Image: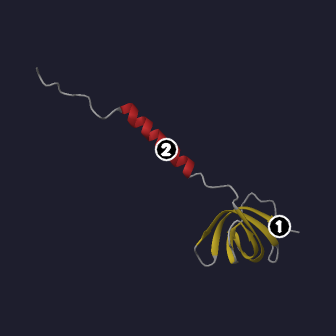
Amino acid sequence: MGIVKVTKSLFNPKLVIIVLLCCLLVACKSGSGDKEVKATFIGTIEELSSNGALVNVEESTGTKLSGTVSIDIPENTNETFSIGDKIEVGYNGEVMESAPGQVITITVEKIE
């Protein structure tokens, strides 16, 4: 009665490849960005810059938001904006803790 040595390694190349592919798929999905509007606010543009605006929030839905908020204006919008325009902003529901607060803008529409 001899002792049987287990010579199989715990390293299985197929298993390693499957685990790596799963990790890549999860990383790609989580890095795609959240493009779903979860909250909106209505406000007036106080200041414009080349890539965004400062907006005074008048009314918000989805989250409690007030004061001045910095937004980026998506490049795919067909509208042009001016200081004093009343706009509705759709964003992902999260407000960055900065002064002024910032949101990840998903939609911006001018209100007549």
Measured as percent of width and height from the top left, residue 19 is found at 43, 39
- Is there CB contact under 8 Å for labels 1 and 2? no
Q: Residue at x 74, y 70 (%)?
A: 60
Categorize mark 2 by other alpha carbons within 10 Å: few (<14), some (14-19), many (20+).
Answer: few
Q: Which residue is mark 1?
A: 110
Measured as percent of width and height from the top left, residue 49 is found at 70, 73
Element at label 1: strand
Q: In the figure, 16 relative to 95: above or below?
A: above
Measured as percent of width and height from the top left, residue 34 is found at 63, 55
Locate the N terminus by quadrant.
top left
Q: Is residue 51 left or right of residue 10?
A: right
Give the residue type at disc 2. Answer: Leu
Locate the C terminus by quadrant.
bottom right
Q: Residue at x 77, y 60 (%)?
A: 77
Relative depth, front residue between 76 and 1: 1
Residue 4 shows in this picture: yes
Categorize mark 1 by other alpha carbons within 10 Å: few (<14), some (14-19), many (20+).
Answer: some
The residue at the far right in this view is 112
Q: Based on the displayed image, in which of its 4 quarters is residue 107 positioned?
A: bottom right
The residue at the far top in this view is 1
Q: Residue at x 79, y 77 (%)?
A: 83
Q: Residue at x 52, y 43 (%)?
A: 25
Q: In the figure, 105 relative to 17: above or below?
A: below
Q: Based on the displayed image, in which of its 4 quarters is residue 75 positioned?
A: bottom right
Measured as percent of width and height from the top left, residue 103 is found at 65, 67
Of callouts 1 and 2, the N-terminal one:
2
Element at label 2: helix
Q: Which residue is mark 2?
A: 24
How many callouts does the rendering have?
Answer: 2
Relative depth, front residue between 45 and 29: 29
Give the residue type at disc 1. Answer: Lys
Q: In the figure, 39 relative to 23: above or below?
A: below
